[in-house]
Image (spheres, rainbow, N blue to C red):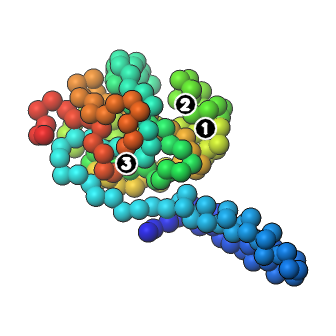
Amino acid sequence: MKIAPEGIPFIGFFFVLTGVVFFALSTRHSMYWALIPLVLTLFMVYFFRDPQRTVPTEAGYISPADGRVLLVEEPVDDMVFLHRDVKMLSIFMSPLNVHVNRAPCSGTVKLVKHKPGSFKAAYHKEAPWKNESTSMVLACDSGAELLVRQVAGAIARRTVCRVKEGDRLERGDRYGMIKFSSRVDVYLPLEAEVLVKVGQIVKAGETLIARMPGEGR
């Protein structure tokens, strides 16, 4: 089991705090007080886990995030990044989900844009437009362009995108994460056939979420 590099400072902090509390108190109750930062240390290890995933061989776009499909909406007018009507698929991540994000297709990063904003609950409909977010436009090898947007929420206060314009990503590659639960929105071509339903649980790098016409089944 790998740990996302963004989690090392959090894990280290609570691990050291556990030792400080245990040894500093030097009483028979110190063990009980030390349980609090110890539990937080274990939670940080769990939260920042980065398990290996098996990318499917079937054609199609794969999920960029673990979580529950929050909504599937069309047409959505995206005149800021893709400059056309698209389908939007939103995935909500709870604090218990893996938070490492993965590329839904193989291609070249065309644009990365961070937008400051508020920190409303990520499941609200206006969250993608009002909340802090990081948008990545990915030019897929198939010729299509996708927009993947990491949206911060009430608990998640920081989106992390590890790539920059011009970088190459293979389908399923790790490219970033969101700290402490939020959502990821994928903007797909209108022609794409969505393969998941609202409420369905998906896994980053493994679950096929959409397919273009003519792609193999």
Relative placement, left or right, of 181 versus 74 is right
Residue 105 percent across, percent down from the top left: 28, 45
Q: In the rendered image, which quarter contains the C terminus?
A: top left
The amino acid at mark 3 is Lys
Mark identifier at residue 153? 1
Q: Are circles 2 and 1 on residues that touch, CB within 8 Å?
A: yes
**Element under disc 1:** loop
Q: Earlier in the sequence, mark 3 or mark 1?
A: 1
**Residue 169 visible, this orientation:** no
Residue 191's image quarter? top left
Residue at image point 35% right, 19% down: 74
Q: Earlier in the sequence, mark 2 or mark 1?
A: 2
Tell which of 83 and 4 is nearer to you.
4
Residue at image point 49% right, 50% down: 97
Rounded to the nearest angstrom, the CA distance separating label 2 from label 1 is 8 Å
Q: Earlier in the sequence, mark 2 or mark 3?
A: 2
List the residue tagged with mark 3.
Answer: 203
Residue at image point 57% right, 48% down: 95
Q: Is residue 139 above or below residue 20?
A: above
Tell which of 191 and 95 is nearer to you.
95
Residue 214 percent across, percent down from the top left: 11, 32
Mark identifier at residue 123? 2
The amino acid at mark 1 is Gly
Residue at image point 19% right, 32% down: 212
**Element under disc 2:** loop
Q: Disc 3 vs disc 1: which is toward the camera?
A: 3
Rounded to the nearest angstrom, the CA distance separating label 3 from label 1 is 20 Å
Q: Disc 2 vs disc 1: which is toward the camera?
A: 2
Relative placement, left or right, of 10 versus 188 is right
Relative placement, left or right, of 209 versus 178 is left
